[in-house]
Amino acid sequence: EGEVDIVIGTHRMLSDDVSFKDLGLLIIDEEQRFGVAHKERLKQMRTEVDVLTMTATPIPRTMYMSLSGVRDISLINTAPAERLPVQTYVGEMDESLLKRAMLRELDRRGQIFVVHNRVMTIDIIRKQLQKLVPEARIAIGHGQMAERELEQIMSDFIDGEIDVLLSTTIIENGIDIPNANTLIVDRSENFGLSQLYQLRGRVGRGSQRAYAYFFHGPWRNLTPDARTRLEALAEHTDLGSGYQLAMRDLEIRGAGELLGANQSGHIAAIGFDLYTKMLARAVKMRKAVQRGETILGDLNEDTKIDLPLATYIPPDYVPDGSLRLRLYRRMAGLDTLEEIDAMAEELADRFGPIPDPIDNLLYQLRVKSLAIRAGISTITTEANQIRLRMPNLEVMDRMKLQRYLGHDSRVSKSAVWLSLAEGTNDWKVALVQVLEKLTNYVSSNAEPAPEG
């Protein structure tokens, strides 16, 4: 009925029997916890509302969609004040090291998380820990316990009445206890990289140095993927390293299906880069059909443009290196002149007046967009002239094309030439005019796009 402005809830809000009067913004926290069914429901909602997704460790598909420009991404790189990186140890189970780690934390009156993700054997682990450190007050917590019992244990741990909380992965999210600064994970090879990162985030939430121990089975028995995950975890220990770990997770697991149900996985048969190029080309072809446009060739993605222009994003305009990289990726994926104009407006709005190198870059993108539709393979400069190579020119009526273009350009057997007046920008205007004429000419003489 619209009487509540902000609703905070769980997945339950995505159910079909829950509706909103005028939903405008949806904020999703811990995106990696949502399954495919929830994502499908969110896709339906995205047509009507703005969606902001927050996560420390994006799933591979989400990560790739951000890198490829399907989704926008922003990074929060500033850690809370006085926060220190977590000292991380990855190695085979060592009882003497385990005992020293627990005693060191207890000596400074801190608390300990121990993660063992098998309910059937968790009591055995408790007895082993109690034998190693008899003075420790140890309690067990897992999802199969009664709700009130689990709530009481968590309350006692927060109040400092428990030294060691032995639990399953239920502590992965939502636990914030500044006095708990040692984490011990048993059989860490059985966890995903994002899970391990989330678990490590349970400690070090205050101003004290925190320690995380990820014990695994014999190294020789680990799968290659498990080894890679653990090596990545040991390598990336800085604050805010979730982005780098998500990149490694993307490399290890693959990006999954952008239009399907799998949120990870490799395209083994053809290779991932080729797959993404084929997908992008198929989408552009389909869009051209829906817009009723004529398809010239196959929307040649390999059109080469080599003009005497400085084309780059200056570091003083966009200081953040990763953001510049994402902008380059987005620009490379622009297809229509409308998309390029929208990008220019966005840059001016976000970063201020557009400098010449970016203006040149946007100009070159417009030239490429027109060149693709005109069936031009390369645009280069030779001896104060601009050469537009057209593979299909040999089968065209070149005399008719020359009359159509006028005296400002010259049509040869395989290319169209126009003068390059250096020192002025007149040639830039002339080039766009010739490309527009070529696009119109070729469109009017091409076969219409197929319907299938």
Image: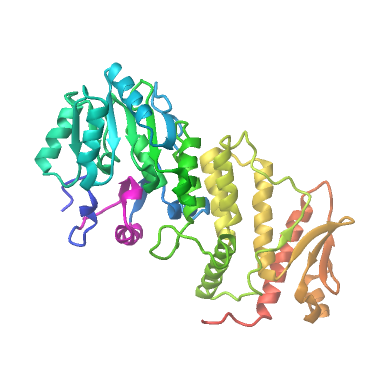
Answer left or right for 244 relative to 167: right
The residue sitting at the right extreme is: 383
Q: Which residues are magenta?
A: 19-48
For residue 391, above or below residue 228: below
Residue 24 pos. (x, y %): 30, 51
Residue 73 seen by the camera: no
Answer left or right for 388 relative to 235: right
Of residue 224 and residue 254, the one placed in the foreground of this image is 224
* Residue at image coords 32%, 56%: 35
* Residue at image coords 36%, 27%: 96
The residue sitting at the top extreme is: 108
For residue 438, above or below residue 346: below
Of residue 411 and residue 266, the one placed in the foreground of this image is 266
Residue 47 pos. (x, y %): 35, 60
Answer left or right for 125 relative to 295: left
Residue 222 pos. (x, y %): 45, 48
Answer left or right for 151 relative to 289: left
Which of the 4 image quadrants contains residue 193? top left
Residue 298 seen by the camera: yes
For residue 436, above or below residue 135: below
Which of the 4 image quadrants contains residue 158? top left
Of residue 227 and residue 368, the one placed in the foreground of this image is 227
